Image: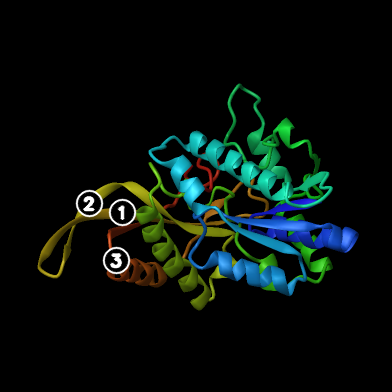
Amino acid sequence: MVLGLSGGVDSSVAAVLLNKAIGKNLTCIFVDHGLLRKNEYENVMRDYEHLGLNVIGVNASEKFYRELAGVKEPERKRKIIGKGFIDVFDEEARKIKDVKWLAQGTIYPDVIESLSITGTVIKSHHNVGGLPEKMNLKLCEPLRLLFKDEVRRVGRKLGMMEHIINRHPFPGPGLAVRILGDITPEKVSILQEADDIFIQGLREWGLYDKVWQAGVILLPVQSVGVMGDERTYENAVALRAVTSTDAMTADWARLPYDFLGKISNDIINKVKGVNRVTYDISSKPPSTIEWE
């Protein structure tokens, strides 16, 4: 059996659960699509090694950047990334003898948001309905009927490390759905730096575990600013932090003004290409947690 890893708590819990059930018969595949957070690939691979999992790391960033070039529409981005994941899993699975199952960390909110009731979906998830027939693999989703808080309880029962269990949710398409508009390596680099300042700041201020999910969005607008005595015309970003229990509803987090002020100054002063920081105070519904 192969399991597609995303680095999030869902796939991590699924991996540990299946590893306890079938041991060495499980091979985990962690795909770096070039849209992860700063240093996330290395950090996640280290965690998986500590969990005793058999993990294959695949750097496929060039493939994803190439296929996403010029694509701006959110659903197209999700579809391209979803297909790309499956293509990589398929290629890697063919290298392993007698693979018959593909496991995924799909949870119930993924299923609900991908349902088409009125003819449209809220947003498609690459791990829901994305398995092509040509792979000829059966699908195993041990967490499919669970919500995130239930998944975390399973993780604790399995004795997993708290920093893995409490890791904020992170979208499968990664920063692609936090960059509004087309994807370029330069935009990803800007967003990785801004996001790292925000997330590390939450940890340092003791706020990380008080919010459900947080991240930075790179907006498709530029604004006038002043750096020293010079006029700038650079990018704007939005900070997003929410509180929730199961991700079906969410409220914007009331973070301290002093914290927001420091993060804003740090991003503007340290991230080249950003001269304006905003804070998203929208709740779900009507807004989704992610912008795309």
Sequence-earlier tag: 2 or 1: 2
Q: Quadrant of residue 136?
A: top right
Disc 3 designates what residue?
A: 268
- How far, Cα to Cα, is label 2 from label 1? 7 Å
Disc 2 designates what residue?
A: 223
Disc 1 designates what residue?
A: 236
- Residue farthest right in this picture: 21
Which residue is at 53% across, 48% downward? 289
x then y, percent, for residue 139: 79, 41
Q: How many marks?
A: 3
Mark 2 lies on a secondary structure that is strand
- How far, Cα to Cα, is label 3 from label 2? 12 Å
- How far, Cα to Cα, is label 3 from label 1? 9 Å
Circles 3 and 2, Cβ within 8 Å, touching? The answer is: no
Amino acid residing under circle 2: Ser
Mark 1 lies on a secondary structure that is strand
Q: Quadrant of residue 258?
A: bottom left
x then y, percent, for residue 35: 49, 54
